[in-house]
Image (cartoon, rainbow, N blue to C red):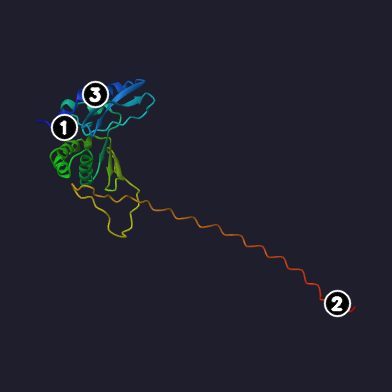
Amino acid sequence: MSVKGQPDTIDVVRLRKYIQALITRPENILWPGYSRFLHDVVPDKFKVHESANLVIIEGNYLLLNRGPFQGLPDMFDLRIYVDAPAPKIIAALVDRHIRGGKTLDEAKSWVKRVDLPNARIAETTRSDADVVIERDTDDDIASVTWKGEEPIASSKPSLPDSGPRSRVLPGSHGSTISPYLPQQPAKAPLPPQPPHPPHPPHPPHPPSVPPKAP
């Protein structure tokens, strides 16, 4: 029995139809979305105008190139794979399911039985991407790797070891992730103040003249 989210539950024929229509650049094209509350597709949720020069389509299996997905990756001009540490992915999935109405235990169970096996299928497509973007536990970009080239590491400065930082706990709800706080730029020194002009000398007091006798 198939479980929602597995590759064989995706309407690939319909997906190809929408992508092909997008390639022809009509004046407007309506694009479906997905509701995490309804747990189903929402028809015509988005409208894409022909003036859009860049359209990003996100999905777990867009780089899958076998079975009904054969040839699908070739429909894209640029193929990007976004990766993140496993604890970060697990915590985000659990949190998403809870916001969608599941209890903590139901969310953990769903991630273990459904989401992680699906993620392993998506992982097999990493080498087919033109670009691999690695994120860290702070949700910042750690590196960008173009196919056939060395990774380009992020220039994010290291944080000083001033104390313990929050950790992402696998499968925990409400885990916090320390936000990256950029270092504040040093304030420019104030320009030197010009010296105060010297005060003009006071005029000499006139000599005291004793009053004349009447």
* Towards the viewer: 90 or 124: 90
Marks 1 and 2 sit apart, C-alpha to C-alpha, by 115 Å
Give the side of residue 209 with respect to residue 94, left or right.
right
Q: Is residue 148 left or right of residue 195?
A: left
The spot of residue 116 in percent (x, y) is 16, 40
* Relative horizontal placement of residue 121, taking residue 150 as reference (left or right): left
* Quadrant, the C terminus: bottom right
Residue drawn at x 18%, y 28% is 10
Quick one: label 1 or label 2, which is nearer the N terminus? Answer: 1
- Residue type at tag 2: Pro
Tell me the quarter of the image containing the N terminus.
top left
Q: Quadrant of residue 95?
A: top left
Mark 3 and mark 2 lie on one chain; the one further toward the N terminus is 3
Tag 3: Cα neighbours inside 10 Å, few (<14), some, or many (≥20)?
Answer: some
* Outermost residue, front side: 214
Viewer-nearest residue: 165 or 150: 165
Marks 3 and 1, how far apart at CA: 19 Å
Q: Is label 3 in a helix, a strand or a loop?
A: helix
User: Which amino acid type is shown beneath numbered disc 3?
Assistant: Arg
Amino acid type at image mark 1: Lys
Residue 85 against residue 19 in the figure, above or below: below
Q: Secondary structure at mark 1?
A: loop
- Would you name the residue on which mark 2 appears? 211
- Where is mark 1, residue-wise? 4
Say which residue label 3 marks.
16
Q: Position of residue 79 (x, y in %)?
A: 27, 33
Q: Secondary structure at mark 2?
A: loop
Residue 158 position, x and y percent, is 33, 54
Measure the C-alpha gap from mark 3 to mark 2.
116 Å
